[in-house]
């Protein structure tokens, strides 16, 4: 793609006739027309685009419009779309059979790779989604400690398990549903809510309920209220409190794992959690989750221990193959993360500079290749309270203007934007130019 491509895009409103028809048809047979709520564009209005294909840093919709993709399937695609090595690994695995419900070598290989990249993970168990990973990790924490409560943070998202749909981020934040219907009062009562980046709020909970807390679960870099960076000492403080009260510290690295560093946020900040959860990049674009951690804790999972957890398709060969190919690419190239960092920093600077020039109040939060541009008059966005003061109506306009300029962003203010290894310097500059153009139509 080149600059001319973007200029062409400026000239005409994009045509999404096919997507409109497809969405209408989908709504007749799929709840809300989508299989995950944020995909419905509820927070920004309009019709979701139906994607026909993706290649490298771009996606093409079924009307033939091409967009630079800064969603990356919500995090997994750190290599971009249809990376040749991932596709080759999938083809190779598929030819050997897609599922056996019996052990395969690929599982051990991926497990070995994760334990090498993330030293706090001594034993691992693969599941099929991030949601399953966090649900299982919390069950394990409860089984291990014999305690019922968990502490989670306002605005953090850990998938759609009942225990987590209390003050949750991501789609739940977008839709403004603090609690989901169907989550019982008894379950909600076992989830204690603290404020992100506010150790006092955690101390307070522990002073009252410390003896009942099985685990603190946290996104070590929050990504599901938009990106919120852990303040100096916050994660260390959580580690101290958990240890003091003999609770477990669970890092939910479903988004940050293999994203902010090869060893995730725990490597970046030098903290050792008791358990970690993974997903997204770990599956290289296929459905995978995992939880793992210290050996003596993980040994309590069945068949070794009394905490039950199982899965017909867990460790699926296709998913393992895609994950392995992805992690191998990441590992092989010492320039991988520095390059992502350089391009992402340029993007963040460019976006902020645009807002300054346009006189638009904005904060850009970024860790590595995950970032969020908040439209806000706040000086900083450090937790859910400050995040939610953002101008979501302006974001909705910005989102649609961006589409018109050939840039595909998450359809909500409270999500991360991802840069992949497939994004070229030109792609970054194009996103910055498109953003400047989009701002004009929004404020
Ligand atoms: C995406 C995400 C999840 C949920 O993963 P799914 O695969 O969507 O179930 C959990 N935790 C975090 C931090 C996430 O970003």
Image: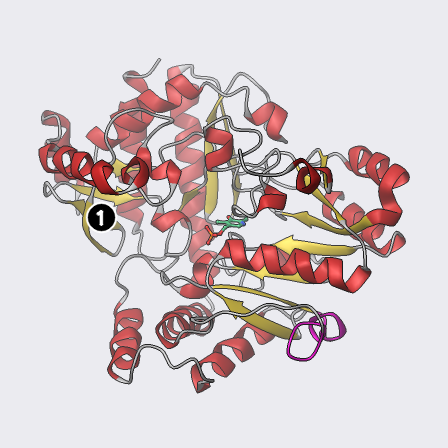
Looking at the image, is 15 positioned above or below residue 2? above
Residue closest to the eye, 338 or 270? 270
Looking at the image, is 13 positioned above or below residue 106? above
Residue located at (70% from left, 58% from top): 270
Q: Residues within 10 Å of mark 1 (few under 14, many from 20)?
A: many
Point out the image quarter for the C terminus: top left
Mark 1 beta carbon near ligand 1 (under 8 Å):
no
Q: Position of residue 422 (x, y in %)?
A: 31, 56
Residue located at (33% from left, 39% from top): 39
Looking at the image, is 319 positioned above or below residue 411? below
Q: Is residue 352 left or right of residue 268?
A: left
Residues rendered magenta in the picture: 294-305
Q: Which coloring applies here?
A: secondary structure
Which quadrant would residue 297 be assigned to in this image?
bottom right
Residue located at (9% from left, 32% from top): 17
Q: Position of residue 125 (x, y in %)?
A: 57, 71
SS at circle 1: strand
Residue closest to the eye, 424 or 189? 189
Q: Is residue 160 left or right of residue 123?
A: left
Residue located at (24% from left, 76% from top): 91
Which quadrant would residue 22 be assigned to in this image?
top left
Residue closest to the eye, 404 or 252? 252
Q: Position of residue 326 (x, y in %)?
A: 39, 68
Which residue is under mark 1? 59
Which quadrant would residue 79 be assigned to in this image?
bottom left
């Amino acid at each position: 793609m080149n600059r001319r491509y973007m200029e062409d895009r400026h000239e005409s409103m994009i045509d999404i006739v096919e997507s409109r028809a497809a969405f209408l048809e989908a709504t007749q047979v799929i709840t809300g027309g989508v299989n995950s709520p944020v995909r419905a564009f509820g927070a920004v209005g309009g019709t979701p685009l139906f994607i026909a294909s993706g290649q490298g840093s771009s996606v093409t919709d079924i009307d033939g419009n091409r967009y630079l993709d800064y969603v990356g399937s919500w995090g997994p695609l750190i290599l971009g779309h249809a990376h040749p090595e991932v596709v080759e690994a999938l083809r190779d695995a598929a030819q050997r059979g897609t599922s056996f419900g019996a052990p395969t070598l690929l599982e051990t290989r991926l497990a070995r790779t994760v334990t090498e990249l993330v030293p706090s993970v001594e034993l691992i168990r693969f599941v099929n989604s991030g949601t399953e990973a966090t649900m299982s990790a919390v069950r394990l924490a409860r089984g291990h400690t014999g305690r019922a409560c968990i502490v989670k943070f306002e605005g953090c998202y850990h998938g759609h398990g009942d225990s987590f749909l209390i003050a949750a981020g991501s789609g739940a934040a977008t839709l403004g549903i603090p609690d989901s219907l169907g989550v019982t009062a008894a379950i909600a009562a076992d989830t204690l809510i603290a404020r992100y980046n506010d150790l006092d709020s955690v101390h307070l909970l522990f002073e009252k309920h410390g003896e009942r807390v099985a685990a603190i679960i946290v996104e070590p870099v929050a990504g599901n209220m938009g990106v919120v960076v852990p303040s100096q000492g916050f994660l260390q403080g959580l580690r101290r409190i958990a240890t003091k009260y003999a609770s477990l510290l669970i890092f939910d690295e479903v988004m940050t794992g293999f994203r902010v560093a090869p060893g995730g946020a725990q490597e970046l900040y030098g903290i050792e959690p008791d358990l970690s959860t993974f997903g997204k990049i770990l599956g290289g674009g296929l459905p995978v989750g995992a939880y793992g951690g210290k050996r003596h804790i993980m040994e309590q999972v069945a068949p070794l221990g009394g905490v039950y957890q199982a899965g017909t398709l867990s460790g699926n060969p296709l998913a393992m193959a895609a994950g392995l190919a992805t992690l191998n690419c990441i590992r092989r190239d010492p320039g991988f993360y520095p390059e992502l960092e350089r391009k992402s920093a340029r993007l963040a600077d460019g976006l902020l500079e645009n807002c300054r020039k346009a006189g638009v109040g904005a904060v850009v939060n970024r860790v590595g290749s995950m970032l969020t541009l908040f439209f806000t008059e706040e000086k900083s966005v450090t937790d859910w309270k400050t995040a939610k003061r953002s101008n979501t109506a302006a974001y909705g306009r910005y989102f649609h203007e961006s589409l018109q300029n050939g840039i595909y962003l998450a359809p909500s203010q409270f999500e991360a934007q991802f840069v992949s290894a497939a994004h070229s310097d030109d792609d970054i500059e194009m996103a910055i130019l498109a953003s400047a153009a989009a701002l004009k139509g929004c404020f």
